Amino acid sequence: MSGSESESEQAAITVPDDLLAGHPTTAYFWGRVAGDGEVTDEGVAVRTNDEGAAEVLATIAGADIDADTASREYAHDTSITRTEDEYTVELAGEDLFGLSGPLGLPVDGRGNYRFGAFREYDRALLRGLLEGCGTICFKSSSGTVGISFVHDDGDLLELIQELIADCPVETPMGDLSATSSGGYWFGVDDEAAPDFGTWLYEDCTGGGLYAPSRKRKLVRSLEQATDIEFDGL
């Protein structure tokens, strides 16, 4: 993402005074925290490998970005690792927990998810969850788009399944299965993945609540699967 693009996206973001309030930005932020973040007594940390998304998260949280590299195992095959840039946005406990205490947070670090305030903003919440613990790929063997969610907490994945089931796009999906790393995963049915992915990312550019690299991956996968250009997505 170029500097001018980054600044224009951040300028479009409106952040409420209370990060626990129901709002598209808070829905996206807490989706990212649940998907790939930590909540402790010291504060909240959320990770991303997309610099543009890190800038958005930092804008929402009013925090700085810590850039580093990290090596991770593939959830489906722990014998394979990948090294990539990693950006962490941290919000100190005293800046957040004073609002309602740590147990009042939408994600409390104990496997409890209180997303009721964000139900009106399910698309931003699901986009944050997908970018935090989901994958998008083009399946060359079948010529289809694959969308799946992977996490150590099966309860979170069941909640994501409920959110997907309630979304306006009919999206059949598989049951939870165990991964070789000890976590769980499920996938959206291949025939439903294009419509679901398009719904998740359509009209998101103006709000800035997305990871540019993930959107590009979706567009490339859709174009490979359909031979149709998705310039408007």
Image (cartoon, rainbow, N blue to C red):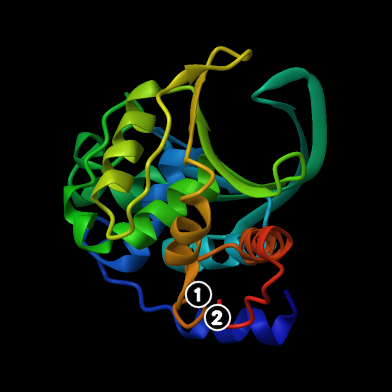
Mark 1, Cα crowd under 10 Å, few <14 / some 14-19 / many 20+, is: many
Q: Which amino acid does label 1 sit on?
A: Gly
**Residue at left offset 43%, top offset 61%:** 61
| For residue 110, side relative to residue 194 (left or right) | left
**Residue at left offset 44%, top offset 62%:** 200
CA gap between label 1 and label 2 equals 5 Å
185 w.r.t. 45: above or below: above
117 w.r.t. 220: above or below: above
**Residue at left offset 32%, top offset 67%:** 24
| For residue 212, side relative to residue 10 (left or right) | right
Q: Which element is circle 2 on?
A: helix
The reply to whether discs 1 and 2 touch (Cβ–Cβ < 8 Å) is yes
Disc 1 target residue: 208
Where does the image place residue 231, in percent across and percent down from the top left? Answer: 64, 81
Considering only order in the chain, which callout, 2 or 1, is on the residue closer to the N terminus?
A: 2
**Residue at left offset 26%, top offset 29%:** 112
Q: Which element is circle 1 on?
A: loop
